[in-house]
Amino acid sequence: MVAAAPRGSKGSASREVDTRSARRLGSLSVSRRWEADFDEWPVAGVRLQGAGSSAAPFESFTDAVDAILRREERCAIVLDLTGASPDANRRRLTAAALDARHEPLERWVVAGALVVPSPVHRGILTAVQWLNPRPLRVAWETFGTPADARAWARTQLRDAARDAERPG
């Protein structure tokens, strides 16, 4: 069972998704999908759930990001790409999806951390971020482990809260 935030919910209530129902009869593969993780809120996660070698439907990625943005609360997002297949088409789709959410991302997201275990893929994603014609005014960093990404995200939230408290 995987917990996922219900559509339209701002709260931390969750619904249960039975991943066993996604199994194909006579096969060991399980459907994969992206899920929003609110366990360490205000550090929100987006990560792959399920097993198997099939690619997760891209719509599940945008659904997970939208679930975080629907909360309309300041947060940090950790996008864990562990187990993902970051080909050029998926990078293009991701860039377009984030660009379509540009304003709410800048309004609600203090910082974003990408978890990319492969040093080669980390380099590619860093270069893609540099070349973005419409970069988000949000701190973004790339990490090799989820723990490092979450620690950085917590620091960014702490720093942003401290800055907001200073008289301007």
Image (cartoon, rainbow, N blue to C red):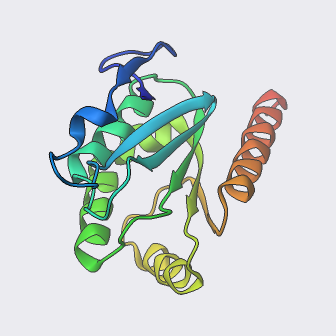
| Residue at the (84%, 32%) spot, across then down | 166
For the image, the number of numbered tags is 0
Residue 1, compared with residue 104, is above or below; it is above
Question: Residue placed at 26% from the left, 48% from the top?
Answer: 31
The residue sitting at 30% across, 35% down in the picture is: 20
* Quadrant in the picture for residue 21: top left
> In the image, residue 18 lies at what x, y percent?
32, 28
At 54% from the left edge and 84% from the top edge, which residue is drawn? 123
Outermost front residue: 26
Q: In the displayed structure, would residue 88 be above or below residue 111?
A: below
User: Does residue 69 lie above or below 116 as drawn?
Assistant: above
144 relative position to 86: left or right: right
x, y percent for residue 3: 45, 26
Looking at the picture, how far across and down is residue 167, in whole percent? 83, 29
Quadrant (top left, top right, bottom left, bottom right) of the N terminus: top left
Left or right: residue 54 versus residue 153 is: left
Could you say which quadrant of the image residue 154 lies in? top right
Depth check, front residue: 137 or 146: 146
Where is residue 5, by image quadrant?
top left
- Residue nearer the viewer, 151 or 97: 151
Report x, y in % for residue 61.
32, 47
Q: Nearer the viewer, residue 20 or 79?
A: 20
Q: Quadrant of the C terminus?
A: top right
Q: Is residue 28 left or right of residue 165?
A: left
Q: Is residue 42 above or below residue 152?
A: above
